[in-house]
Image (cartoon, rainbow, N blue to C red):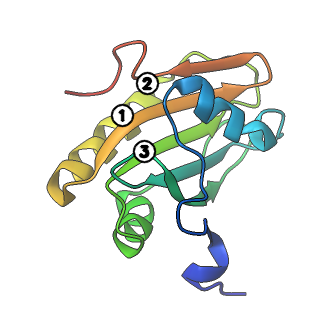
Amino acid sequence: MQFTLKELVHEYPTHNGPVFKTAEDVYTETKNMHDCSKEIFTVFYLNCKNRVIARETVSVGIIDASLIHPREVFRTAVHVNAHAIVITHNHPSGDKTPSSNDKEVTELLTKAGEILGIKILDHLIVTTNGYTSFAQNGLLPK
């Protein structure tokens, strides 16, 4: 079965999406992912005022991994004219600690975003026990 981009992306009506001011705002919007048994990688696409204009589940993986590639993340960002993105994924284990793979993916996506002029504002790892924000913990590549 093949899906179209429109079927996979939830676009918010103009000026109706949530505004992300803090990592806690992002965490609240990911509550449906907190206790999932598989790793889910979701991207929020933002306008220049940090209002969510679209949300997409880019990948559903297995219990401890998810396949991510920049083309999958930024295809929609370009399509919806995103100014910036926030990336999120859950850890079914409940451990909020970023893995080395989490850090590598964040670095790769940051470099791709720089080329396209689309900034990554944060990467959150979410669990039922809370979250880890790359931005708050100085883990976003410069």
The residue located at (39%, 64%) in the rendering is 77
Q: Nearer the viewer, residue 19 or 5?
A: 19
> Which residue is under mark 2?
100
Of tags 3 and 2, the one toward the viewer is: 3
Q: Residue at x 51, y 25 (%)?
A: 22
Q: Residue at point 35% right, 68% down?
A: 81
Q: Residue at x 61, y 65 (%)?
A: 12
Query: Left or right: where does residue 120 sit relative to residue 92?
Result: left
- Counting residues from the start of the chain, the first of labels 3 and 2 encountered is 3
The answer to whether mark 1 and mark 2 are in CB contact below 8 A is yes
Whether residue 40 sits left or right of residue 88 in the image: it is right
Q: Nearer the viewer, mark 3 or mark 1?
A: 3
Q: Sequence order check: which comes first, mark 3 or mark 1? A: 3
Residue 43, above or below 91: below
Q: Which residue is mark 1?
A: 104
- The image quadrant where one finds the C terminus is top left
Q: Position of residue 106 (x, y in %)?
A: 37, 37
Residue 67 visible somewhere in the drawing: no
How many residues crowd mark 3 within 10 Å: few (<14), some (14–19), many (20+)?
many
Type of amino acid at the residue the image marks with label 2? Ser
- The image position of residue 8, as x and y in percent, is 64, 73
Q: Quadrant of residue 38?
A: top right
Q: Position of residue 54 (x, y in %)?
A: 54, 62
Q: Secondary structure at mark 2?
A: helix
The local secondary structure at tag 1 comes to: helix
Residue kind at label 3, given as amino acid type:
Asn
Three-letter amino acid code at the position of disc 1: Glu
Tell me, for residue 50, which label it has, or none: 3
Where residue 29 sits in the image (x, y, percent)?
68, 40
